[in-house]
Image (tube, rainbow, N blue to C red):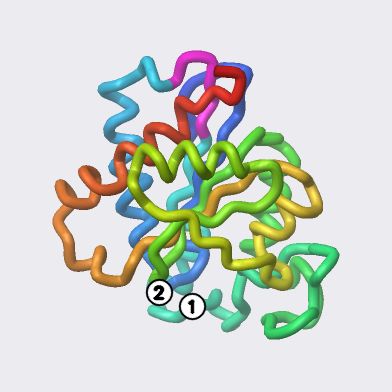
């Protein structure tokens, strides 16, 4: 199934937002679709920005209702990190899954300056790389605690934060959010997603 990226704006600061790496964690699709909708009515958020949205990286896993891709490989253990293969992971080698290949190639081509990825079912803000100040800003705005999870073998967070030394935020959404309305989701997480877009480390 296709992997689709939507682009908003054409500013110098490039931002990437990713949802649904794990097929059983689809809340990111809903939240990023909400964010794109609100960007259309709040174009000022895009001042100086180019924002790339990749709401659904693991379309096959979503349709099959499994964590991994159609080959049952966990995409978020597939990146060529220094810690690849330490502890539990899926796949015999980095970038075995086409989804990880596509995302890595897109990151190399688009060269985003910061990345946000949405996961479930924990509740908190994790970060890797030089993102401590950004994470604290998002926590202050949203009243969602910072919860460090550590660098998982082959994860996108490890690859972007540790190996590329770029700021990456992992927003963990609790499982009960699946049953909440679209209005509740945006009230709860919209301010954080807006803040991630408009954040200016110089100000």
One can see residue 125 in this view: yes
Horizontal arrangement in the rendering, residue 194 relative to residue 182 (left or right)? right
Asked if residue 49 is among those painted magenta in the image, a careful observer would answer yes
Mark 2 and mark 1 in contact (Cβ < 8 Å)? yes
Mark 1: secondary structure:
loop
Mark 2: secondary structure:
loop
The residue that label 2 is drawn on is: 24
Foreground: 146 or 15? Answer: 146
The residue that label 1 is drawn on is: 67
Residue 120, x across and y down, in percent? 41, 67
In magenta, the rendered stretch is 46-51
Mark 1 burial class by Cα count in 10 Å: few <14, some 14-19, many 20+: many
Foreground: 141 or 109? Answer: 141
**Label 1 vs 2, first from the N-terminus:** 2
- Residue at the image position 40 percent from the left and 21 percent from the top: 45
- Residue at the image position 67 percent from the left and 70 percent from the top: 152
Residue 48, x across and y down, in percent? 53, 15
Residue 39, x across and y down, in percent? 34, 28
Mark 2 burial class by Cα count in 10 Å: few <14, some 14-19, many 20+: some
Q: Is residue 19 above or below residue 140?
A: below
């Amino acid at each position: 199934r296709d992997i689709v990226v939507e682009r908003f704006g054409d500013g110098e600061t490039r931002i990437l937002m990713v949802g649904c790496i794990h097929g059983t964690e689809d809340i990111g699709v809903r939240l990023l679709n909400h964010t794109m909708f609100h960007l259309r009515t709040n174009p000022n958020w895009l001042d100086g920005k180019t924002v790339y949205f990749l709401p659904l990286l693991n379309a096959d896993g979503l349709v099959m209702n499994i964590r991994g891709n159609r080959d049952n490989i966990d995409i978020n253990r597939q990146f060529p990190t220094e810690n690849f293969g330490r502890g539990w992971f899926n796949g015999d080698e980095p970038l075995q899954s086409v989804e990880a290949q596509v995302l890595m190639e897109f990151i190399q081509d688009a060269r985003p300056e910061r990345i946000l990825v949405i996961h479930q079912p924990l509740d908190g803000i994790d970060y890797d790389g030089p993102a401590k100040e950004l994470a604290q800003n998002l926590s202050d705005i949203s009243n969602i605690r910072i919860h460090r999870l550590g660098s998982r073998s082959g994860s996108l967070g490890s690859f972007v934060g540790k190996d590329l030394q770029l700021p990456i935020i992992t927003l963990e959404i609790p499982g009960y959010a699946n049953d909440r309305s679209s209005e509740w989701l945006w009230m709860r997480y919209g301010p954080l997603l807006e803040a991630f877009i408009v954040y200016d480390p110089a100000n």
